[in-house]
Image (tube, rainbow, N blue to C red):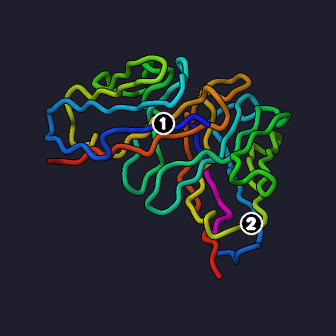
Amino acid sequence: EIVLTQSPATLSLSPGERATLSCRANQSVSTYLAWYQQKPGQAPRLLIYDISNRATDIPARFSGSGSGTDFTLTISSLEPEDFAVYYCQQRSIWPLTFGGGTRVEIK
Amino acid sequence: QVQLVESGGGVVQPGGSLRLSCAASGFIFSSYGMYWVRQAPGKGLEWVAFTWYDGSNEYYADSVKGRFTIFRDNSKNMLFLQMNSLRADDTAVYYCAKDLLAAPGPYYFDSWGQGTLVTVSS
């Protein structure tokens, strides 16, 4: 099983600041990595797939990068609606797995 | 627009059974793989099961293999999860989700329902 480790667990930032979230895999996932956003009481939403492709209607301030085992989600300038929990997920090998999540909170 | 509506959650005793349903609309259901994903209270996301667009292949997390069955009725645009031998650690919100691409997957969880809560407790 591929284990995805997200860091930090919590990121405290102010609106307008840049957020950098990390996801590390215990073995290569090739390009098969996605990021999701989840707000309280809501279902997750797909943000980024295959490392760097933005899903439909996702703003350009969200970007993904990385390769192999180390990946980053960057939010260039935090908007009030971006404070949420973010999960990475791999589809390289069964079972499909998620990271434990990073909470982006208002400082 | 894509709409996924889950139903069938509730309270069930350990060892009991429950069937979840997911009604799909707004896309060609028979062209997409479908998933079940769960989230225990206050915890992260866990993939549960996946079925190909035509139902010919199924995949399960080890934690539910042999107890849960995913199946679909493409004539009615419905996805199901039959859950048997339920345990306390199956307590979670269960989401159905649509695959990203209309091809044999898996790809990614593109659209999600609002979820249905399953509580396993005596």
Mark 1 chain: A
Q: Position of residue A77 (x, y in %)?
A: 19, 29
* A85 shown above or below B9: above
The prevailing secondary structure element of the residues shown in magenta is strand
The residue to which callout 2 is attached is B18
Name the kind of residue labelled 2 in the image. Answer: Leu
Q: Is residue B84 left or right of residue A47?
A: right
Viewport quadrant of the N terminus of chain B: top right
Looking at the rendered structure, the secondary structure element under dot 2 is strand
Residue drawn at (43%, 60%) of the image:
B42
Q: Position of residue A45 (x, y in %)?
A: 46, 39
Give yes or no for residue B81 being in the magenta stretch: no
Residue B55's tag is none
Residue, far right:
B56
Give yes or no for residue B6 being in the magenta stretch: yes
Q: Are marks 2 and 1 on the same chain?
A: no
* B63 shown above or below A14: below
The residue to which callout 1 is attached is A4
Q: Position of residue B32 (x, y in %)?
A: 70, 31
How far is the residue under mark 2 from the one under mark 1?
31 Å
Mark 2 chain: B
Q: Quadrant of residue B12?
A: bottom right
Residue drawn at (35%, 43%) of the image:
A102
Number of other residues with Cα within 10 Å of mark 1, as a class: few under 14, some 14 to 19, many 20 or more: many
Cβ atoms at labels 2 and 1 below 8 Å apart: no
